[in-house]
Image (cartoon, helix red, strand yellow):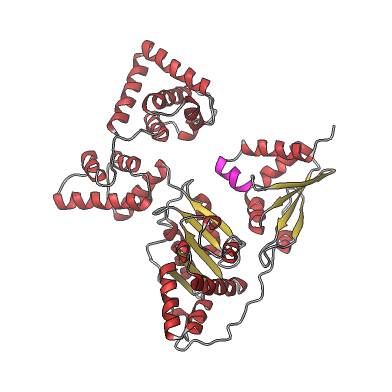
């Protein structure tokens, strides 16, 4: 019996979901639309050229294997790419890409959109003779080396490195970075700029906040120098605009930025934007601007997980040549979990307090500093923190705690983690199970019973659980 298009693609998604993280699945596979299935050829539609290139670079082997399982060894995959770079409603472009193991790099290049011819600037700005004399306004400390990668920012950082290596030459132009306050948007955007400036000596890089851009435009209107203002921004090779949400309801500023954006984009120049929300949620913004913000890649930066927060603190301490007990960094990273800026501020306060009062840096000093940053230190313990405590205690990687391995040591550590999560958190059994690879509530119940039974019969096991309980209580 012939399989239908919907059945084939549904089965493919089920297989793919089991091989990638949930975030990757939502980002790269949920937006795909199956178009048709003829003979052994499956056609799928992807939303952009960048999307297609990312799939081909990172997931082609997985796609090839999955399609062959569903259709057969001679299966082929075709992409249909919605091309919307120059027009809001453009016709789709179909690309035939066999799911073979051969190197298609040369043929792929044939399919990629060629950049539009550069638009010559007809104006000459008085006083600007040498492009190198334009000050970039970048903070030299904001580099990729100082930027800690975690699951919370992996996509954004990878895209940033790609842009930095080929400014204006990738499909993600503009690159829009969005996220809450203090999550590293400005750092990452400027890291791109600093890398380009150091690597491409002929490129002019400029960082500007949306507020600064607006004020400069107002001054230009007052002084009758709008042409000079526009011409200045049109000669920039890499333009970084921070906090574009503040353009909201500023109609004339939006209009001038719209024309600046168009000129740079059509000239093959790189545009990098940051915002506190994705383009589709920007209020008070012209639709034509929002449409252009969507042309490239929109990447979010989320709140870093516990391990990433610890890594951020330890990286900063290492750069400053300072040694601090691991228990201190773990305590601070656990209790200050809102944003990176606040976390680094607490670390600076800790070091300053230690230096000024000549006190040793220990857990007690850390607690006194954290109190000024966090309103309630007796907040609920999180499941991820319990996993970290158990992982360190038994020297079992967290991915094994949440994975499927049945090794005795790992199983016991996993069961203890579930038991402690049930004891110290308000999460439901179902919610706890999700933290351990999507296990159901009955598995959590079994784990709790197993731990209680072993504590009654195995003294060493009981001592391990008691010690872990003490460590968790100390962290409150």
Q: What secondary structure predominates along the stretch shown in magenta?
A: helix
- The image position of residue 374, as x and y in percent, is 29, 44
| 24 is within the stretch colored magenta | yes
Which residue is more in the foreground, 129 or 200?
129
Report the number of numbered marks.
0
- The image position of residue 400, as x and y in percent, is 49, 31
Q: Quadrant of the C terminus?
A: top left
- The image position of residue 382, as x and y in percent, is 39, 34
| 310 is within the stretch colored magenta | no
Q: Quadrant of the N terminus?
A: top right
Residue 209 in view in this figure: no
Which residue is more in the foreground, 442 or 456?
442
Which residue lies at the image location 24% right of the left edge and 49% below the top edge?
Answer: 350
Identify the image quadrant of residue 118.
Answer: bottom right
Identify the image quadrant of residue 69.
Answer: top right
Which residue is at the far left? 357
- The image position of residue 143, as x and y in percent, is 42, 61
- In this rendering, the answer to whether 221 lies above or below 18 is below
Which residue lies at the image location 47% right of the left edge and 47% below the top edge?
Answer: 152
Q: Which residues are magenta?
A: 21-29
Which residue lies at the image location 37% right of the left edge and 30% below the top edge?
Answer: 393
């Amino acid at each position: 019996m012939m399989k239908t298009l919907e059945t084939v693609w549904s089965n493919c998604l089920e297989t793919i979901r089991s091989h990638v993280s949930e975030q990757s699945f939502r980002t790269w596979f949920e937006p795909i639309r199956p178009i048709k299935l003829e003979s052994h050829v499956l056609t799928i539609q992807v939303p952009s050229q960048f999307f297609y290139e990312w799939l081909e670079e990172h997931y082609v082997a997985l796609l090839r294997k999955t399609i062959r399982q569903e259709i057969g060894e001679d299966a082929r995959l075709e992409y249909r790419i919605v091309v919307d770079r120059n027009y809001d409603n453009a016709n789709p472009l179909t690309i035939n890409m066999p799911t073979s193991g051969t190197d298609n790099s040369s043929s792929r290049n044939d399919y990629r959109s060629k950049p539009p011819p550069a638009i010559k600037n007809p104006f000459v700005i008085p006083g600007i003779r040498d492009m190198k004399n334009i000050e970039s306004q970048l903070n030299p400390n904001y580099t990729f080396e100082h930027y800690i990668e975690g699951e919370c920012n992996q996509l954004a950082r990878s895209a940033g490195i790609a842009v930095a290596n080929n400014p204006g030459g990738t499909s993600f132009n503009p690159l829009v970075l969005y996220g809450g306050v203090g999550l590293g948007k400005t750092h990452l955007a400027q890291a791109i700029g600093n890398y380009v400036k150091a690597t491409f000596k002929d490129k002019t890089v400029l960082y500007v906040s949306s507020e600064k851009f607006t004020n400069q435009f107002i001054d230009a209107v007052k002084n009758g120098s709008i042409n000079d203002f526009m011409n200045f921004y049109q000669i920039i090779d890499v333009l970084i605009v921070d906090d574009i949400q503040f353009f909201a309801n500023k109609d004339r500023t939006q209009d001038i930025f719209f024309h600046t954006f168009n000129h740079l984009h059509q000239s093959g120049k790189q545009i990098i934007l940051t915002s506190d929300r994705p383009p589709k949620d920007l209020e008070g913004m012209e639709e034509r601007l929002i449409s252009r913000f969507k042309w490239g890649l929109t990447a979010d930066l989320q709140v870093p997980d516990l391990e990433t927060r610890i890594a951020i603190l330890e990286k900063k301490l290492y750069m400053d040549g300072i040694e601090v007990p691991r228990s201190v960094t773990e305590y601070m990273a656990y209790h200050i979990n809102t944003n990176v800026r606040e976390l680094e501020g607490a670390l600076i306060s800790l070091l300053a307090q230690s230096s000024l009062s000549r006190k040793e840096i220990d857990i007690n000093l850390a607690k006194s500093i954290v109190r000024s940053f966090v309103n309630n230190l007796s907040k609920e313990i999180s499941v991820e923190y319990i996993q970290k405590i158990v992982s360190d205690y038994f020297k079992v990687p967290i991915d094994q705690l949440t994975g499927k391995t049945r090794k005795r040591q790992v199983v016991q550590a996993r069961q203890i983690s579930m038991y402690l999560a049930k004891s110290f958190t308000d999460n439901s059994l179902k919610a706890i199970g999700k933290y351990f690879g999507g296990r159901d509530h009955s598995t959590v119940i079994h784990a709790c019973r197993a731990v209680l039974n072993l504590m009654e019969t195995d003294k060493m096991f009981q001592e391990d659980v008691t010690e872990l309980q003490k460590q968790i209580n100390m962290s409150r």
